Amino acid sequence: MSVTDPAALHDAFTAAINTSDVDALVALYEPDAIAVELDGSECTGAGPIRAMCAALAESIETIHGSTRKLYVTGDLALSSGRWTAKVRLPDGTLADAEGVTSEVSRRQPDGTWRFVIDDPLF
């Protein structure tokens, strides 16, 4: 999934989660991106980002979100969004979760945008 407008990154993220498309999720991140997991731990790099995306796709039943704010200057963007989700707990039950995000994204040489820093509970 190619995102050519940073305003579309949140929608692309929620669409990938809601379809459990790990490859689409991974494609939203630069290879050396930093992502903060829901437990507050950080993961950096292609392997850990893929593992995080796979875990999110498995544990989130549905997610809804929207962009709160977006600032773009040149090839960088700072964004924030709100999200609500049904999260599958280890025992299989569903719980409600919500948060406010903060992300830095960068325009790639091909004109697409990808996350460089992603914090789902900023």
Image: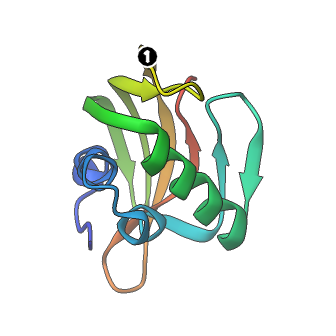
Q: Quadrant of the C terminus?
A: top right
Toward the viewer: 52 or 107?
52
Pointer 1 residue = 97
For image coordinates 26% across by 72% down, the residue present is 1
Q: Amino acid at mark 1?
A: Ala
Q: Is residue 7 left or right of residue 46?
A: left
Snapshot quadrant of residue 6: bottom left
Toward the viewer: 93 or 33?
93
The outermost residue toward the bottom is 110
- Residue 117, given in percent of the width and then of the height, sits at 60, 49
**Does residue 101 lie above or below 72 as drawn?**
above
Question: What element does badge 1 sit on?
Answer: strand
Task: Determine if residue 92 is in view.
Answer: yes
**Does residue 10 lie above or below 80 as drawn?**
below
For image coordinates 41% across by 72% down, the residue present is 23
What count of labels does the image hold? 1
- Residue 68, given in percent of the width and then of the height, sits at 29, 25
For image coordinates 51% across by 48% down, the residue present is 104
Q: Is residue 4 left or right of residue 21?
A: left
**Does residue 56 lie above or below 109 as drawn?**
above
Q: Is residue 75 left or right of residue 39?
A: left
- Residue 62, given in percent of the width and then of the height, sits at 28, 34
Q: Residues within 10 Å of mark 1 (few under 14, many from 20)?
A: few
